[in-house]
Image (cartoon, helix red, strand yellow):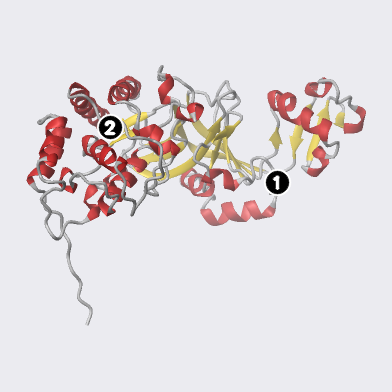
């Protein structure tokens, strides 16, 4: 016979103190003092569950552009103001690989840090042991900061953890201003690209129905901020290389490998038709005056689909043959356009109200290899934005790397510092 046990978390007095501190009712340092007086650990109930650090609340279907998000980030500003007023959180020595099972004096500072920010219940107590409760808290912290939730303290987790509370407060305040500017009517259905998070939300009736990992522009080829409306899907698109890519990428590659264009199905088009690459002097930049077009196919830079919308930046969203890039921590690799993971799901959602373009027909068209433009019967608003900090309520504040340095504090550009 199998016996199933139900495990529930009961807050001890120290646990209540920790929650109160994050809500501004009790000083953060009082929480730590209370724990230290409890002989190294909190008053545990035997049925305490490590999952009680609310890791499930980090994920949310609430859109970043929701009016509720504005309210929640205002609450987070109040909470972080209180943390700053009480001295912030301690620095965690970034000298060792801390993970589950480790016993080390540095875990004491780690526990205190996670308690002040609300990731670890105060009832977990103070000790040198990296136990399952610390593991759950670290994973929660990592999820809030867009890091792989593996529970291991590496260089990015340390860097994010040791940004001071007052700098995080400033980041919240900066992004609150940005979010307030987007508090109007955005439409019943829209797509939002959040550049620092390298993430896309498809929103319907103020709820995220699809969330996609994205790849956005490099620091020297930034994805622009824009508002537009998606009006066209091109299945099996031709790729026309922008002049900037011809100069920065294609010409240098042709100098190294004269067969590069042929190997990648890229043709040179001039006023009188196709141009033979051997007639061009690649030691100069004469090639930039021509148009470079890649044929549809699996190696096409946009792979199966391109999502178009009017804008002055020649920017669009698309598929990619380089699917492995979506697994990178820092997904800032494009020349300004946005690559979308699982893009066919997003396109199916966009084409939902366009007659004749269900998922089956869409997939069949991809297989045909024919380049087909499709006009959406109802254009869908799209917003490219820069939100590096927000809140989803329940004391959950999210932070991301200020990749383009728009928050005004060098410390927030983690990818540049490491």
Q: Is residue 101 left or right of residue 332?
A: left
Above or below 38: residue 20? above
Residue 16 x/y as whole percent: 10, 42
Badge 2 or badge 1: first in the primary sequence = 2
Mark 1 neighbour class, 10 Å CA radius: few under 14, some 14 to 19, many 20 or more: some
Q: Which mark is residue 50?
A: none
Looking at the image, the residue that sits furthest to the front is: 105
> In front here: 50 or 184?
50
Residue 49 x/y as whole percent: 20, 56
Q: Which residue is mark 1?
A: 299
Above or below 170: residue 146? below
Residue 147 x/y as whole percent: 41, 41
Q: Is residue 125 left or right of residue 336?
A: left
> In front here: 215 or 46?
46
Helix, strand or loop at label 1? It is loop
Q: Could you tell me which residue is drawn at 34 percent across and 39 percent down? A: 144
Q: Give the distance between the C-alpha atoms of the residues marked 2 and 1, in whole angstroms.
A: 40 Å
Q: Would residue 59 be seen by someone viewing this image from the given angle?
A: no
Looking at the image, the residue that sits furthest to the right is: 279
Q: Would residue 250 be seen by someone viewing this image from the given angle?
A: yes
Q: Could you tell me which residue is drawn at 71 percent across and 47 percent down? A: 297
Above or below 195: residue 297? below
Q: Which mark is residue 69?
A: 2
Helix, strand or loop at label 2? It is helix
Quadrant of the snapshot with the N terminus: bottom left
Looking at the image, the residue that sits furthest to the bottom is: 1
Above or below 354: residue 383? above
Looking at the image, the residue that sits furthest to the left is: 13
């Amino acid at each position: 016979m199998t016996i199933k046990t139900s495990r529930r978390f009961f807050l001890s007095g120290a646990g209540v103190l920790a929650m109160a501190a994050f809500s501004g009712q009790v000083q953060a340092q009082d929480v730590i003092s209370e724990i230290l007086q409890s002989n190294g650990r909190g008053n545990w109930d035997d049925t305490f569950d490590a999952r009680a650090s609310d890791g499930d609340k980090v994920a949310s279907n609430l859109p970043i552009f929701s009016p509720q998000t504005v309210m929640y980030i205002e609450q987070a500003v109040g909470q972080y103001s209180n943390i700053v007023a009480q001295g912030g959180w301690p620095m965690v020595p970034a000298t060792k690989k801390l993970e589950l099972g480790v016993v080390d004096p540095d875990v004491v500072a780690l526990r205190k840090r996670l308690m002040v920010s609300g990731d670890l219940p105060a009832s977990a107590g103070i000790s040198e042991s990296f136990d399952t409760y610390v593991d759950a808290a670290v994973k929660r912290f990592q999820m809030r900061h867009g890091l792989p939730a593996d529970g291991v303290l590496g260089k990015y987790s340390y860097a994010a953890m040791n940004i001071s509370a007052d700098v995080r407060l400033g980041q919240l305040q900066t992004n609150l201003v940005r979010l307030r500017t987007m508090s109007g009517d955005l439409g019943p259905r829209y797509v939002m690209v959040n550049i620092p998070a390298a993430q896309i939300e498809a929103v319907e009736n103020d709820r995220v129905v699809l969330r996609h990992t994205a790849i956005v522009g490099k620091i020297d080829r930034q994805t622009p901020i824009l508002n537009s409306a998606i009006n066209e899907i091109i299945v099996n698109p031709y790729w026309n290389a922008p002049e900037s890519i011809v100069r920065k990428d294609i010409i240098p590659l042709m100098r190294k490998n004269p067969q590069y264009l042929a190997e990648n199905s890229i043709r040179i088009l001039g006023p009188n038709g196709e141009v033979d690459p051997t007639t061009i002097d690649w030691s100069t930049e004469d090639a930039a005056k021509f148009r470079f077009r890649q044929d549809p196919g699996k190696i096409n830079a946009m792979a199966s689909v391109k999502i178009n919308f009017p804008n002055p930046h020649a920017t669009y969203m698309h598929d990619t043959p380089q699917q492995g890039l979506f697994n990178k921590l820092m997904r800032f690799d494009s020349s300004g356009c946005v690559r979308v993971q699982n893009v066919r799901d997003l396109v199916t959602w966009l084409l939902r109200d366009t007659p004749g373009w269900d998922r089956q027909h869409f997939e069949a068209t991809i297989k045909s290899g024919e380049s087909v433009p499709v006009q959406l019967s109802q254009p869908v608003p799209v917003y490219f934005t820069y939100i590096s900090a927000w809140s989803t309520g329940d004391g959950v504040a999210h932070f991301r790397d200020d990749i383009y340095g728009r928050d005004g504090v060098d410390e927030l550009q983690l990818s540049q510092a490491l």
